[in-house]
Amino acid sequence: MAGRLEGKRVLVTQAEDYMGPATIELFTEEGAEVIADNSDLTETGRCQALIAQTGDIDVLVANLASPNFTGIQVTDLADEDWHCTFDMMVHPLHGLCQAAVPQMIARQAGKIVVYGSATALKGMPTVTAYSAARAAQAGYIRSLGVEVAKHNVQANLIAQNYVENPVYYPQKLREKESFQKSLARQVPLGRLATAREDALFALFLASNESDFFVGQSIPFSGGWTQ
């Protein structure tokens, strides 16, 4: 039986980081030709060059992450930390979409899937830079989604939190009793999602099954936010 992405060309950014490995593994299983990119998307013109070099893609998976800068009061936030989150997560998102959308419009078909964050939907202290950048991603996709919908291009964002990841949730942290208690208190499901569960959601948004979703930022956080 054919996979859900059979014959589709998919570009995944930050392929070795964050949700890259799980996405590539699952999408490949589902028949996609995956182009895995690990280049520095903060370089001027790199996003546009990447799309040009890659050629036609059916699906853009914008897997963009930056340091979290957790625990820093807004009064102590350095200018470079503030700019870093936007340089790594917001400006590349625009560059990638602006370069990829014309070819999708020409074909009257395409999917843009963004791995975002639920911090864009729920206030948290001492993560202002990260939350602001993630909220900017959500706002961008909300607007882009309605702009390109008439061309049969669907752009959506996974607003995630509490997903297994060696950067945000390293094994040593997960083994701590204090973290386990916090997890039980903060997340109604009482556990982290696996990376594959998250990738399965991205697979849905990348497939033709999600054709009626437009500009959504959909929570994926075990009930931490709705």
Image (tube, rainbow, N blue to C red):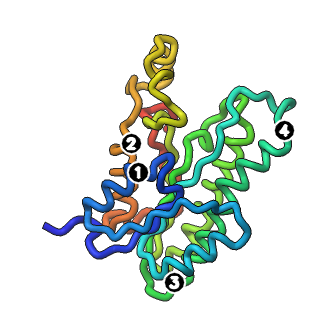
**Circles 1, 2 touching at the beta carbon (< 8 Å):** yes
Q: CA distance from mark 2 to mark 3?
A: 30 Å
Q: Residue at x 50, y 37 (%)?
A: 161
Sequence-first disc among 3 and 1: 1
Q: Amino acid at mark 1?
A: Pro
Mark 3 or mark 1, whichever is nearer to me? 1
Q: CA distance from mark 1 to mark 4?
A: 31 Å
Sequence-first disc among 4 and 3: 4
Mark 1 or mark 2, whichever is nearer to me? 1
Dot 4 falls on a residue whose secondary structure is loop
Q: Residue furthest top?
A: 177
Q: Amino acid at mark 4?
A: Ala
Q: Residues within 10 Å of mark 3 (few under 14, many from 20)?
A: some
Sequence-first disc among 2 and 3: 3
Quarter holding the N terminus is bottom left
Q: Residues within 10 Å of mark 1 (few under 14, many from 20)?
A: some
Which numbered dot is residue 195? 2
> Which residue has dot 1 on it?
21
**Circles 4, 3 touching at the beta carbon (< 8 Å):** no
Dot 2 falls on a residue whose secondary structure is helix
Q: CA distance from mark 3 to mark 1?
A: 26 Å
Sequence-first disc among 1 and 2: 1
Which numbered dot is residue 78? 4
Dot 3 falls on a residue whose secondary structure is helix
How far across and down, in percent of the image, does residue 57 sit? 44, 76
Q: Residues within 10 Å of mark 4 (few under 14, many from 20)?
A: few
Q: Residue at x 42, y 33 (%)?
A: 222
